[in-house]
Image (spheres, rainbow, N blue to C red):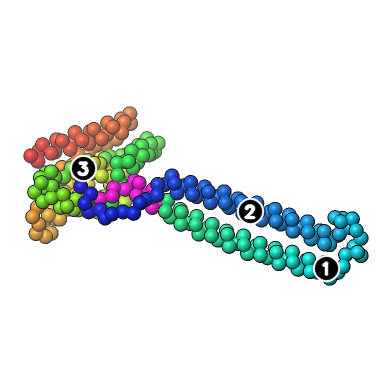
Amino acid sequence: METLVAERQPEIAPERIEQKIRALDWRDIQLWCIGFVVLVVLAAGFVALLAPQLVWHISAAVARQQDIAQLIFGLTALLILLNLYLFQQRLVLLRTRRELIRQLQIAERKARTDALTGVFNRRFMEEALTREVAQAERYHRNLSVMLADVDGFKNFNTTFGHLIGDHILVEVATLIQKNFRAADLVIRYGGDEFLVIMPDTDLVQAGVTVSRLQWWLERWNDSEQREYRLSLSCGVAEYKPGRTIEDVIKAADADLTFWTGVRK
């Protein structure tokens, strides 16, 4: 089915990237510890040079001024080199951290995105619905879902092949995304089914949105000459306090089944 997807390079799991970021944090702490220890040693060296009678139990007159100047110069040079080294290492750590964070964001996005259509996948749906239901209950907001099914999709695969079938799924996902708001979450529910989570939307508004989607679909069918025409059966349901997520999806599925029967 996933024939439109190009061969992908091996991906690093988000958990593995998080481990690398934690390792960088530990490396950062190590650098600070090294810097602190070296600064303590250098401070002790300066004390020994400036007040040798306190460290070596000899009088300041015994220490030759030339040797002290050379040692101070050496310690100063060492301090400068240490700072340069720590700065360079910190710069490397920051760059590596930024790159790992970027990779983590990409990995997390891929983990919740359907590889074929580019919309959210079913794994993301579970956490998104849980979050949106909690928001609806807490702030007394409306929440509706739409379940859409491509009519006769199996026949598309049989007649035109899986490559065209994949292309149809991509086209449907694009049409749905264009029709809904940015706040709505478009999810590939499975196979040729798509689910849309619509926050702040009651059942009437959801019905209007579905009608608009059907209108846009007809325009898409008429926009150019194709060997096929697309049609969608859509079911909607509204979340009510006391209902579970499963109840809402079942209600949308029942509405979808009804309209599928009407179309047939």
| Image location (x, y in percent) of residue 192 | 19, 44
Task: Identify residue for label 1.
Answer: 67
Residue shown at the point (66%, 62%) measured from the top left: 82
Q: Earlier in the sequence, mark 3 or mark 2?
A: 2
Q: Where are the magenta residues, as a range?
A: 105-117
Helix, strand or loop under label 2: helix
Magenta-drawn stretch contains 114: yes
Asked whether, in this view, residue 47 is left or right of residue 175, the answer is right
- Residue 157 is marked as none
Q: Residue furthest bottom?
A: 66
Residue shown at the point (89%, 55%) measured from the top left: 57
Amino acid under label 3? Gly
Mark 1–mark 3 distance (CA, rounded to whole Å) = 82 Å
Amino acid under label 1? Asp
Task: Identify residue for label 3.
Answer: 191
Q: Please say whether residue 81 is visible from this viewpoint.
A: yes
Amino acid under label 2? Trp
